[in-house]
Image (cartoon, rainbow, N blue to C red):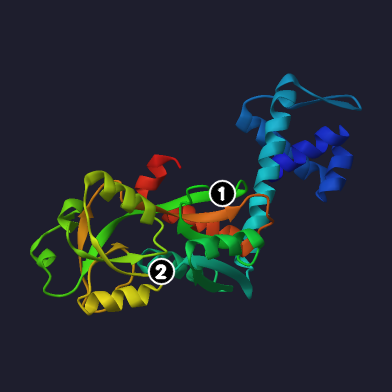
Amino acid sequence: MHQIRYFLAVCDSLNFTRAAEACNVSQPALTRAIKALEDELGGELLRRERNKTHLTELGRLVREPLALALAETERTKREAAAFLSLGDSPLTLGVMYTVGPSRLVAMLDHLYRTAPGIQIKLRDGTPAAVLAALMSGETDLAVLSRPDDPPERLELLPLYRERFVVAFPPGHRFARQNAVRLDDMAGENYLLRLECELRDVIRQTREQRGVDMNIRCQSQREDWIQSMILAGMGCAFMPESMPMLPGIETRPLQEESLQREICLAIVAGRRFSPAVRAFVTLAGKFAAPETKRAGR
């Protein structure tokens, strides 16, 4: 890269002596570096005629691409230095409380090992609360399911897709099955999770299929729903990665439409700290292959 820098300095001044002074090197060292660059590119870049120096056709051709390459290299070096010097760098991450930690812990652990100065503060909440905190600037980033009608400035980086499961108490008939169809839920006592982002989709799907369930209770509290499942009051649909109370059994729900996509949400145009940029870069590497193929 120093060869490129010396060449660009001569392009600016069209004088080897002044270019060497600007680069703080001797003129012979600058001349040798540019000769090495010419050898690598396969032709003359600069031509000296007495006291006058000018660019050759090849020199004019490569000047702009080399300037862009140098600028990109310098930017990358600055970002790398900022990343490696992260010290006591805070990052506030909003997480939808139905998102289990299993898929995110490995990413957080990798981030801590590569940039131990980062200090992450987790704030969980309902989908609406997590999104509102992100848009208002209370949090830097958010992990949540893809909203049906996202705000205009919201950018979403898909992390993974997951199915829903049927959660039921020990001894339930579903324990004898490998999976549960939606039709199997007909006549079952059902516990409705009011903060479920697929609540309307589930209702519309079962109405279209004529699947009637006995809604025993409705609650915004996941711990209440799970406690009632353990008490034998009914079943509920849950995301497969959601942490469950010990004793609750689950089976996959055989319904392709009942899936959700978990994304990392970013507010476009907002200035990001090095810690936030590091987290976003790492999240892109940890995204599940199926979400990358989807291109969303």
Q: In this view, does 106 lie above or below 183?
A: below
Q: Where is residue 254 in the image (x, y as percent from the top left)?
A: 20, 51
Is residue 257 visible to us here? Answer: yes
Q: Residue tagged by mark 1?
A: 155
Secondary structure found at label 2: helix
Residue type, label 1? Glu
Where residue 272 appears, as percent x and y from the top left, is 66, 58
Please tell me which of labels 1 and 2 falls first in the chain.
Answer: 2
In the rendered image, residue 41, in percent from the top left (x then y), is placed at 62, 29
Place of residue 145 in the rendered image (x, y in percent of width and height, measured from the top left): 44, 56
Mark count: 2
Q: Residue at x 22, y 80 (%)?
A: 231
Q: Mark 2 points at which residue?
A: 105
Q: How far apart are marks 1 and 2 (CA)?
A: 23 Å
- Which residue occupies the extreme top position in the image? 57
Mark toward the viewer: 1 or 2:
1
Q: Quadrant of residue 244?
A: bottom left
Camera-nearest residue between 12 and 219? 219
